[in-house]
Amino acid sequence: MKIAFAAPGKFKGEALAAAVFENGQLSASAKALDEASGGAIKRALKSSRFSGKKGQLLDLVSPNGVEAARIVLFGLGKEAELGDLDFERAGGSLYGRLASSGATDATVYVDDLNDAKTTTQSAAAHLGLGLLLHSYRFDKYRTKEKPEKKPSLKSATVGVAKAANARKQFNELKFIADGVFATRDLVSEPANVIYPESFAAEAKKLASLGLKVTVLGEKEMRKLGMGALLGVGQGSKRESQLVLLEWLGAKNKKSAPVAFVGKGVTFDTGGISIKPAAGMEDMKWDMGGAGVVFGLMHLLAARKAKVNAIGVCGLVENMPSGNAQRPGDIVTSMSGQTVEVINTDAEGRLVLADALTHVQREYKPRAIVDLATLTGAIIISLGNVHAGLFSNDDELSERLSAAGKAVGEPVWRMPLGEDYDRLIDCDAADMKNVGGRGAGSITAAQFLQRFVDEDRPWAHLDIAGVTWSSKDKPTVPKGATAFGVRLLNQLVAQHYED
């Protein structure tokens, strides 16, 4: 999808789009289009329920007086309440409406804003980002798709005053889209294409952006004592991997980094505690946490973030076989703590346990955020809207919550405590890997906390409910969402860069 910026001029384009504010207040461009079309816009407003509220869209097909196949009006609500995120969503919604309209190009007008919480040029840049984010499509395996089923829209021009300023801001924002798309690509791939070794091969390509990439195989991990991670992958013929991504962008290259750790179960059958067949194909995206770390590190390196950051991807395939881990097995983690594996389908926490230990011993980070499609229980709690947030540090939690709100990736803090922690105590080992039916997301987080140094700020994001979307959203088309890439980039930009 090509996005351009130009000064507003003569109306041109197969499709034209202009804003309407709440209560039908026309923007300057909408007024001009109304005059050019002989009052068609005002007549359309009177005969419809469109009132300019946020998210509303109204089509006028083949309007007289303008050389365009259609005019699309998009509602923005009250101008005084408008921020960049509102324009992103407007851009994404416009793409969704125009993508299959038959139009190959469109012009979207962003008029001068007087009372909004953002500038006109920033609004235009973010509207362009919204158009771009919704244009993502994973269609590489569709060999017989008919042309009329494919999106027709190929390019869009944002008409705005001081277009060069808006274009400059958009070019910076485009790094975000690149990182998001990198994650969506990985998470969308089937498990016969993306497995631990092929994921690691993709990670090695990030060296071209300036990242240092290190891959540990099973031999190296065995020497380090990573029995928890290796136990999960022992039933698969695919070799487990640990990918380390280092970006040293701070002025002081030796300053403590911020670390991001992702669960990368490239396919999860549940192992011997096998999952039901229905829906198991979705488990190709059980590596969503590692996918987010990959996209985030891509983004930080591409925009040359002034931060030292470490990305860790624990990569395994959880398969049943004659060599698979059994319920009742006891494994020794890299930390030296032992775990009785009650359920082999509670595998992600075992992978993260060793990844967390390694990143602390090797890099001594000033803060850690891990991400994982860890529990179905978090979906029962929060649905498909918020990610679950667990943390040992109030300041880090508040920063993550604010960052999520700013970019439209909301998190909700969940409790931790001794009463929950006791639920994973075990007679046979230091702990067991599940704590019973109740509070499943919390006991999973308590398990992870046992592998985090007591005085180290740490947060765990359970993204099981937000990694994949079953329906289109304004800036997130159906499929892999890359939830977390923007959230963590915002966290870094606000709090960890020089």
Image (cartoon, rainbow, N blue to C red):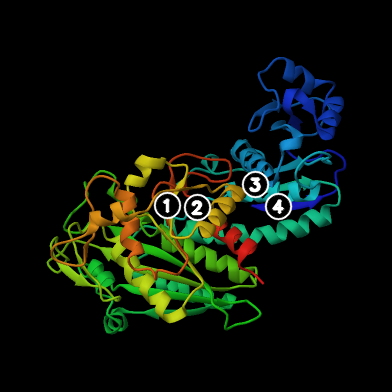
Circles 3 and 4, Cβ within 8 Å, touching? The answer is yes
Q: Earlier in the sequence, mark 3 or mark 4?
A: 4
Q: Earlier in the sequence, mark 2 or mark 3?
A: 3
Query: Tag on residue 463?
Result: 1
Residue tagged 2: 483
Q: Residues within 10 Å of mark 2 (few under 14, many from 20)?
A: many
Please name whichever residue, 339 or 424, is drawn nearer the observer in this view of the structure: 424
Distance, label 1 to label 2, CA atoms, is: 8 Å
Q: In this figure, which residue is indicated by the disc labeled 4?
A: 3
The x, y position of residue 372, in whole percent, is: 39, 58
- The numbered mark, 1 or 2, whose residue comes first in the sequence reads 1
Work out how far the residue at label 1 is from the one at label 4, CA to CA, in angstroms: 31 Å
Asked if the residue under mark 2 is in contact with the one under mark 1, i.e. CB atoms within 8 Å, the reply is: yes
Q: What residue is shown with label 3? A: 131
Q: Amino acid at mark 4?
A: Ile
Three-letter amino acid code at the position of disc 2: Phe
Residue at image location 87% in from the left, 42% down from the top: 9
Quadrant of the frame with the C terminus: bottom right
Name the kind of residue labelled 3 in the image.
Leu
Labels 1, 4: front one = 1
